[in-house]
Image (tube, helix red, strand yellow):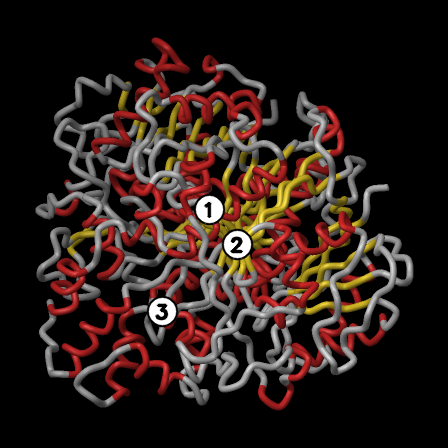
Amino acid sequence: MTTPRDTFGRPIVVVTGMGIVTSLGAGKSDNWTKLTAGESGIRTITRFPTESLKTTMAGTVDFASVEPFTSTGLSERLGEMATEEALAQSGIGSKGDFPGPLFLAVAPVEVEWPQRMELGRAVGKPDVDYNDLLRISGGGQYASFHNRFMFGSVAAHLAEKFGTKGSPISLSTACASGATAIQLGVEAIRRGETDAALCVATDGTVNPETLVRFSLLSALSTQNEPPQAASKPFSKNRDGFVIAEGAGTLVLESLEAATARGAPILGVLAGCGELTDSFHRTRSSPDGKPIIGCVLKSLADAGMTPEHIDHINAHGTSTPENDKMEYLGISAVFGERAKQVPVSSNKSMVGHTISAAGAVEAIISLLTLEHQRIPPTINYEIPDPAIPFNVVANKALDARVTAVMSNSFGFGGQNASLILTREPA
Amino acid sequence: MTETTSATSGPIEVWITGIGLATSLGEGLDANWDALNQGRINVDEKTFAPYIVHPWCQVSLDTQIPKKGDQRQMEAWQRIGTYAAGLALDSAGVKGNKDILGRMDMVIAAGGGERDLAVDSGILSAQAKGNSAPAFLNERLMSDLRPTLFLAQLSNLLAGNIAIVHGVCGTSRTFMGEEVAGVDAARNAAARIAAGQSDIALIGGSHNGERKDLLVLYEFGDFNLKDKFAPVWARKQQAGFALGSAGAFIVIESKQHALARGAKPFARLSNVVADLSTRKQPGEVTATLDKLWSQLGPLDSGGAIITGTTGIEPVTSEERAFLQKHADFAVRATGTRFGHTMETQFPLGLGLAALSLSRGALFPAGDSSGAEIDMQGAPSQIVVVGAGHWRGEGMALVEAVK
């Protein structure tokens, strides 16, 4: 029997259930088939008019519906779908009774345009300002807007539906949110606070204002035709990320608890690292030190050295800045191995699922460990010579993979890295 | 959702070694303490009439946010928070200490940033005048939104700005979810320190109550206090909260870490607990608060309670039913004095509890309804309570370090 503690004497944290939704489809099976076939989920947006937008494609999840439609409602629905899959696989607890806390990565919530415009119409005069909106907002007819647009609304719903314990945590660390949700779960189990944690990350926020906001920051690809070719991490002609929707749920348990109940052990959360970059709101420190520190912390937390890592699931957004800085950071830590370890970016196919990305990519990393097959980075036609990663170019690669590093770097200097392994060390 | 895990039962003591307050009553510990003792309340019944808000006490931002460029990159809620975070770091004696700040963990409770009201109003007016072309919204947003406004709205960019301005660069997590996010920020940071996962952390939040977009959001649920100010305990006939404006941060660290650097504690953060009652049946909030109380640890009689009571019904009455079981505790409602600062209310309560313990007195009652009684002598234990206007309940035990 494996010892239930790691080399630092902490409970070993394992994954016993996973669920995933992306623009490629719902569920691990569908996603894995398409990811390893190099399919793209990026398509021209049909949810709303795209005239006058510089970017007209995204990785929207169009097969899930919510009524009335809100981005927050869609985030909630995607989170539900991923969680149902993860719980079914894990077999933990019972229906509506999950024996641990919820850590939810979710996009910041706000009143959305369809609802704001509904209010504007209700004002019933040609010049509308916030005083007018205020005058008509009360009285209970818009009470559902309050409930929907509370920051804690998605977590409250998921906590109630799945019966998680205690106060659910809704968190945002921008593009690192999914990784942070996992990290919070790992830390809680290591503290002995709980034997299990439900880590959910979801994002259904492709809407006009989100696109405009990222466009105005020049963060999005504008290579709209064909949409499938827009996301091209590590390519010389990359020009921005492609925004996308999705969700990922991981059931984390202590190895001891998972073993005791005969649960499937899908992989191990061997290490987590995080280090904040204070250089700039949207750009990484040019010396790469925060990324380097983050990666080193994750290795130290896992009790590993770069030699142990045989695949990097990159943040790889396809922005000129990120991919360059990710190489700088990884090469500083990995040395020559940075050019040898197979590196791939799932975002080439599923786009950047923002708040969900860290969890979606952790799940794909675990599927990589399970299948010993690395999904490709598609659209890798013109390698950027300044980024000499060993990119898994365009076709899936069969490889011996024992430990994956999954990186997430976000606005606000949020850097997080996870190390996932197949077996407890 | 019936169990709660006690977060800080580990062997490592967690000390509060820094407090930063920038509120409607003033900036800094002395100004806030004096205002509380004088019974002063800063309330604005006119600007947003009939809605009542507590405006932020304007300060010279330059003392904590020296670069004008940084100030311009933020909206008011971020400036308030970044300012107050700086005060907390000063108070803890770690401002500018790169060694400590570089590994200091940060857990922030945040909502989101303010809308550009003129842009929104322009779009809604154009719509009202019949502009409904498919691309109309896109065109207006592309041309009217300020490129950097998004960064001033993003929840995690309060933490981002604190990192940039003050250099707090260990880990950075932003919790969202209204009032209880402030409880959970404290709960998580304290649990990490108690378990040896962290040595020192900055926790807190900030809120700008002078926002019409927020008033609209809460007006959907008829939560805003209207027409006339009254203490939170005297609002049963006219329930509501008056949005407050405040930044409240505390620095917490392990006793060992504090002693090693010669830092003096304001108080000990002995426990933080939280839960989510579904609030489907009357009495659920009272029952949840009763349960959280029982989890705090040994309580002596004659302590004090600092609560973030909202003035919303029925949750305020439910909380009162809980408080009446502890009539020997002197209660103080921060909502009367500071307004309702949402995510920030609980960190504000923690800061005021630590301040009161360090000054050897509880500030005077602020209400004549009988809910708040005078307290003689120095408190040794203060329980900080928060029951959100909609969801979430939490409590902390703050104790004097003898």
Residue assigned mark 3: A111
Vertical comparison of B101 with A94: above or below: above
Which image quadrant: the N terminus of chain B? Answer: bottom right
Residue at the far right: name it. Answer: B301
Check disc 2 and report its element: helix, strand or loop: strand
Whether residue B94 appears in this view of the structure is yes
Check disc 1 and report its element: helix, strand or loop: helix
Q: Give amino acid for label 2.
A: Gly
Vertical comparison of B113 with A149: above or below: above
Question: For the residues marked 2 and 3, what is the alpha-carbon distance in whole angstroms?
Answer: 24 Å
Residue assigned mark 1: B82
The answer to whether the residue labelled 3 contacts the one labelled 1, judged by CB atoms less than 8 Å apart, is no
Check disc 3 and report its element: helix, strand or loop: loop
Whether residue B1 appears in this view of the structure is no
Residue A197 appears at what percent x and percent y?
A: 61, 48
Residue at 72%, 50% (x, y): give it: B354
The answer to whether the residue labelled 1 contacts the one labelled 2, judged by CB atoms less than 8 Å apart, is yes
Vertical comparison of A171 with B132: above or below: above
Residue B66 appears at what percent x and percent y?
A: 39, 39
Residue assigned mark 2: B247
Count how many numbered circles sit on residues in the image. Answer: 3
Residue at the far top: name it. Answer: A336
Q: Nearer the viewer, residue A310 or A263?
A: A310
